[in-house]
Image (cartoon, helix red, strand yellow):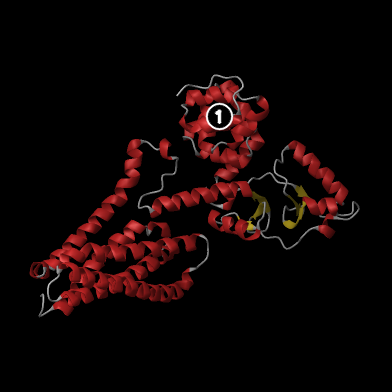
């Protein structure tokens, strides 16, 4: 692709071309942006892309772009590069900013402390509204970039209350902040997981949430734009795991060929070994298959019915857990609901299977004189396999969550492989009982 040439390159054009540009072309296009929009464009990039641009700039040009980022975005950028590169980036900061970033880096990346911005609008509860507005203007000019709410703190930095900008401007100028502020503040702890933070934003439609330590001292804010990125990352990771692989942790084209193989081969080997158990299970019923070869015709039908029902259920449960719609203590309610669902679905599918065998035999006479018993065996097997698959698909994510694993690891391919093995056993066991003395 040709590199950008026009001095009138627009932000939209660069955004559109960005994914397929080389780093040299990205750098050239970025330098062609008007200064008035270059800052916003740079801030909108992912931490990985920001780091790539900065590291390819001459050292003398790096400082302005490093300093344009707030501390939480800088922490993300530092985590996206190698340690020696991180030191090079941190060296561009003043002492105060470097301390802020290092504090954020001490938190786990997926905790509220790792997401928060330590720069927020603060006021004292004994200020008048006029004084508070003037103080907020001063903070906005100096370092606070995000002013959704003003947080009232005491001398020990304990959070006492919060005011929205609307409340500030509507209140009488001579009123005290303490008279107007909302004292019942919803907060998150420093170690609160990012998924729990995301649920709070979803439930309350906040623009920002205060982060406090165990003593109630305010440490920073998590803003809605931060959590949107987190939710997208979490959803991407879960979808990739549900597909039966490890999460990529980077855009598709930025993952190297061998890195991609490494992410995929592990689960594929596990699933392949699981499918080998299906062959082992079938070998245990060699006599039945030899006596009635027609039984083998319905193996794909049986195991796919169980696998599909299990995959459906596991996907529903994984998503419900991710959204906080159910908890571990709800396992019994889930089990009862899915057992009933499995029975009903199994009856419907089993009857369809029975009708198919009866109708096809009437047309072609393919299944011999005991065709009806064969149809009953298939129908009952489908009922058993679908019920088992539905229960397995619902319980496996809950079991994984109980032991501290990611429920998304109970992926559709994994559940399908598990049900395949059990489906073969159920099918040939039911067929042996029903067809003994006739086909067997």
Secondary structure under tag 1 reads helix
> Residue 395: where, in percent of width, then height?
39, 68
The outermost residue toward the front is 363
> Residue 96: where, in percent of width, then height?
66, 37
Q: How many marks?
A: 1
Residue 136 sits in quarter: top right
Given residues 159 and 349, the one toward you in this image is 349
> In this orientation, does residue 307 appear?
yes
> Residue 417: where, in percent of width, then height?
28, 60
Task: Please give the residue where the numbered disc 1 appears in the rendered image.
Answer: 14
> In this orientation, does residue 406 appear?
no
Quadrant occupied by the C terminus: bottom left
Seen in the image, is 54 located left or right of residue 312?
Answer: right
Seen in the image, is 112 located left or right of residue 242?
Answer: right
Above/below status of 137 relative to 361: above
Seen in the image, is 439 located left or right of residue 359?
Answer: left
Residue at horizontal 12 percent and vertical 79 percent from the top? 436
Residue at horizontal 18 percent and vertical 74 percent from the top? 374
């Amino acid at each position: 692709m040709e590199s950008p040439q026009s001095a009138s390159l627009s932000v939209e054009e660069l955004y559109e071309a960005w994914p397929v540009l080389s780093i040299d072309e990205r750098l050239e296009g970025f330098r062609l942006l008007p200064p008035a929009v270059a800052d916003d464009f740079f801030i909108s990039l992912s931490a990985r892309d920001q780091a790539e641009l900065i590291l390819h700039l001459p050292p003398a040009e790096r400082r302005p772009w490093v300093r344009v980022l707030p501390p939480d975005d800088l922490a993300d950028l530092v985590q996206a590069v190698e340690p020696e590169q991180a030191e090079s980036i941190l060296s561009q900061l003043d002492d105060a900013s470097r301390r802020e970033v290092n504090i954020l880096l001490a938190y786990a990346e997926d905790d509220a402390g790792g997401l928060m911005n330590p720069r927020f609008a603060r006021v004292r509860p004994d200020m008048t509204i006029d004084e508070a507005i003037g103080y907020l203007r001063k903070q906005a000019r100096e370092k606070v970039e995000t002013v959704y709410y003003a947080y009232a703190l005491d001398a020990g930095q304990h959070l006492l209350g919060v005011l929205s900008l609307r409340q500030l401007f509507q209140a009488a100028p001579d009123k005290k902040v303490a008279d107007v502020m909302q004292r019942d503040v919803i907060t998150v702890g420093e170690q609160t997981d990012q998924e729990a933070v995301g649920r709070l934003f979803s439930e309350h439609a906040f623009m920002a949430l205060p982060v406090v330590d165990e003593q109630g001292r305010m440490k920073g804010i998590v803003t809605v734009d931060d959590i949107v990125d987190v939710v997208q990352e979490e959803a991407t990771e879960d979808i990739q795991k549900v597909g039966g692989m490890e999460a990529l942790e980077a855009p598709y084209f930025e993952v190297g060929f061998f890195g991609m193989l490494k992410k995929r081969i592990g689960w594929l080997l596990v699933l392949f070994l699981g499918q080998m158990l299906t062959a082992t299970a079938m070998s245990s019923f060699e006599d039945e298959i030899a006596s009635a070869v027609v039984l083998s015709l319905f193996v794909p039908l049986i195991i796919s019915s169980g696998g599909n029902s299990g995959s459906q259920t596991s996907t529903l449960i994984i998503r419900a857990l991710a959204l906080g719609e159910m908890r571990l203590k709800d396992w019994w309610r889930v089990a009862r609901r899915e057992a009933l669902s499995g029975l009903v679905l199994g009856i419907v599918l089993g009857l369809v299977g029975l009708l198919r065998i009866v109708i096809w035999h009437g047309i072609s006479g393919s299944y011999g004189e005991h065709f009806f018993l064969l149809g009953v065996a298939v129908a009952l097997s489908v009922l058993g396999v679908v019920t088992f698959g539905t229960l397995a698909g619902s319980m496996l994510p809950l079991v994984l969550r109980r032991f501290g694993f990611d429920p998304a690891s109970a992926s559709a391919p994994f559940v399908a492989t598990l049900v395949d093995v059990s489906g073969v056993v159920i099918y040939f066991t039911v067929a042996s009982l029903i067809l003994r003395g006739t086909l067997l």
